[in-house]
Image (tube, coloured by chain):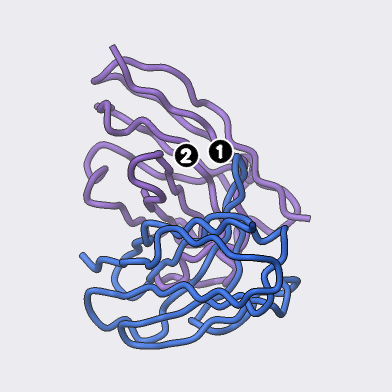
Chain colours: A purple, B blue
Amino acid sequence: EVHLLESGGGLVQPGGSLRLSCAASGFTFSKYAMSWVRQTPGKGLEWVSGMTHSGTNTFYADSVKGRFTISRDTSNNTLFLQMNSLRVEDTAIYFCAKSPVDYCSSPRCFYFDSWGQGALVSVSS
Amino acid sequence: DIQLTQSPSFVSASVGDRVTITCRASQGISNFFAWYQQKAGKAPKFLIYVASTLQNGVSSRFSGGGSGTEFTLTISSLQPEDSATYYCQQLSTYLTFGGGTKVEVK
């Protein structure tokens, strides 16, 4: 059974940094593209960033480009999201999500058959 | 950016009713399209991809259709456990989600 567990959320001041982790189990992590998707009450679901199975290609929403960095540690089956220069509007629940398509290197595979339970990130002074 | 507009934003229906949710894209997206169900306090659940293919294990009460700019999610016979918010997603040009449709079972 696929299991995704996020950690690293918390309260941070505007301009601060936070690093989210997503521990994956129950599947061959290196075969699948992974993404981060966030959710706020006011704006619903928003895709944040994705990475292809090999880690070669990364993609970002315009709202986070230049501030967030996605990465993966295949040896430890973990996905990361480094978030810098955080803004109040980055406040959200952040979900780690898995693509169902193996060995896909296109954002057109960034639909998600498994999700974590989410990590809350609050940006406030 | 491709915008997705879901309608209605809220629907209240009775057990056994047929419910249809529509998602309209601001430009053509072929069938690069998916639907999710989210219950309160939970992560989204994957329902349908490439517009009409049901994910394994999803009830056959759910069906998807459409292509181009208009897509539908239909629940053929609404059940109490279908109470949730439903989201559409396009994958044609990067990714965007619709604003959601809350389905209430009377």
Mark 1, Cα crowd under 10 Å, few <14 / some 14-19 / many 20+, is: many
Q: Are marks 2 and 1 in contact (CB under 8 Å)?
A: yes
Residue A30 image-quadrant placement: bottom right
Q: In the displayed structure, does residue A92 sit left or right of residue B104?
A: left
- The number of callouts visible is 2
Residue flagged by tag 1: what amino acid is it? Gly
Residue A85 tag number: none
- Residue B72, above or below A102: below
Label 1: element kind? loop
The C terminus of chain A sits in image quarter: top left
The N terminus of chain A sits in image quarter: bottom right
Label 2: element kind? strand
Q: Disc 2 is attached to a residue of which chain?
A: A
In 3D space, how far apart are the residues under numbered discs 2 and 1 (Cα atoms)?
A: 5 Å
Mark 1 lies on residue: A118
Mark 2, Cα crowd under 10 Å, few <14 / some 14-19 / many 20+, is: many
Residue A32 image-quadrant placement: bottom right
**Where in the figure is residue A67, as x and y percent of width and height?**
25, 36
Mark 2 lies on residue: A94
Q: Nearer the viewer, residue A118 or A55?
A: A118
**Where in the figure is residue B85, as x and y percent of width and height?**
53, 55
For the point 29% across and 29% down, the residue is: A84
- Residue B11, above or below A24: below
